[in-house]
Image (tube, rainbow, N blue to C red):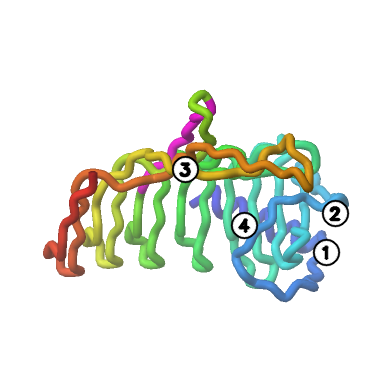
Amino acid sequence: MKSRQIKSALINFLLIILSKDSIGQDNSRFISYEIPWEKIQHDSLGHFHYKLQHDSTKIIFIDPHNLEFLIYDSVFHYILSEGGFFRELDFFSRHGKVTEYYTDGKIESVGYYYRDQPIGLWKYYYPNGQLSKAYSITYVNDSAAQGKNGFCKVGLYEEYYDNGNLKMSGCYQVGFDTGFYKSPIAEPPWEEYVKVLVPVSKKFGRWVYYKQNGEIEKTEENY
């Protein structure tokens, strides 16, 4: 709680000394992680302040070590998300733990990224604080088998009703489907499509689906 108060105080201070002109009309939760060329300003602590190119109502605060970010809605005055990031040249991507929030400050989701790709354990929450769903994502490297790399759900997957009762439960495993991708070597009009194996998430074993009162609605077997 103390950390949240410090961040809120820092945001309020920065919003006083920095420009708050908002010309964008899109108040959706879409977030672009491309940093504008112009660095607007930084405070005495070394924190950088950017406005997002695609939505000028969203502000990025970046710590002086370029390891953490905080995204703030300058119109409705609340934190959208915060976490770690990876910077490369003039672009940065989510990297490490990232937390997103509802407008009242409650947690909406917590998960992990590897260079903007979701990975590891992910948890989503209802506005009332109850867990909505939880699952894990892993990185699949199949280049040795002439396949494509990818990120897939694996292991236990669970969804819940907003009253806390389990809605569904089952497991995912990594499977492979046939796909095609354009060869990076061939040039038009001699474009070539290469057949590869693409990793995908597939259900396996028994999945159980529940009614809101906790009774089993159905089960299914996956092979």
* Residue neighbourhood size for the residue with mark 1, other residues' Cα within 10 Å, grouped as few (<14), some (14–19), many (≥20): few
Crowd rating for badge 2 (residues with CA inside 10 Å; few <14, some 14–19, many 20+): few
* Residue type, mark 4 in image: Ser
Could you tell me the amino acid type at mark 3? Answer: Thr
Q: CA distance from mark 2 to mark 4?
A: 20 Å
Do the numbered discs 1 and 2 sit on residues whose CB atoms are within 8 Å? yes
Where is residue 191 drawn, in percent x and y? 72, 44
- For residue 141: magenta? yes
Nearest to the eye among marks 4 and 1: give it: 1
* Mark 1 or 3, closer to the camera: 3
- For the residues labelled 3 and 2, the Cα–Cα distance comes to 47 Å
Could you say which disc has been placed on residue 40 in the image? 2
Dot 3 or dot 2, earlier in sequence: 2
* Cα–Cα gap, marks 4 and 1: 17 Å
User: Horizontally, is 138 left or right of 210 in the view?
Assistant: right
Three-letter amino acid code of the residue under disc 2 = Ile
Identify the residue under disc 1: 19
Residue drawn at (73%, 65%) of the image? 55
Q: Which residue is mark 4?
A: 8
Q: Is residue 223 left or right of residue 194?
A: left
Q: Residues within 10 Å of mark 4 (few under 14, many from 20)?
A: some
Query: Range of the magenta residues?
Result: 135-143
- The residue tagged 3 is 178
Residue at x 15% of width, y 65% of height: 217
